[in-house]
Amino acid sequence: MEYEIPTDEPVSTAVVRAVAALEDREPDSLRPLADVLDPEALDALFETKPDGKPRAGGHLSFVYSTCRVTVDNGEYLSVQPLAGYPPSRGIREGIPSPDR
């Protein structure tokens, strides 16, 4: 599943929402992202520079829940189920909007 991160959404929030959608679960039913990595540090890696310009070229991959998550430049997520964990219906329906 590929996901473009909205400019007003922290990367950490996008990760949780994307994984929840892929697994067809509510975000709050997932293991806390902080058990895997520091969400504030993740957000800091991809936030804009002090001069307001975007950072370029950042890439980070990690395992969260039953998925391999890759963040590219703080703009895109790729979320793939780990071997042995088939994707659920969430991948076909897309990621629910934050206001749902």
Image (cartoon, helix red, strand yellow):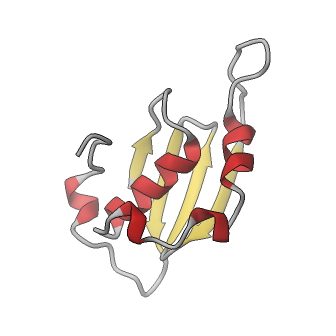
Kindly give the residue lying farthest to the top in the view shown: 51
Among the 4 quarters of the image, the one containing residue 98: top left
Q: Residue at x 28, y 68 (%)?
A: 24
Q: Is residue 13 above or below residue 20?
A: above
Q: Position of residue 30 (x, y in %)?
A: 45, 71
Specify the quadrant that holds the N terminus: bottom left
For image coordinates 30% across by 50% down, the residue present is: 95
Query: Viewer-proximal residue, 95 or 87?
Result: 95
Query: What is the x, y in percent for residue 34?
Result: 65, 64
Residue 52 drawn at (x, y percent): 71, 13
Left or right of 61? Residue 6 is: left
Number of numbered discs visible in the structure rendering: 0
Residue at image position (72%, 35%) is 57
Task: Tell me what residue is drawn at x 65 percent, y 59 percent.
Answer: 61
Residue placed furthest toward the bottom: 84
Residue 82 falls left or right of residue 34: left
User: Please, is residue 53 above or below residue 57 in the view?
Assistant: above
Q: Position of residue 29 (x, y in %)?
A: 39, 71
Q: Establish if 49 lies above or below 32.
A: above
Determine whether, in the image, residue 78 is placed left or right of residue 96.
right
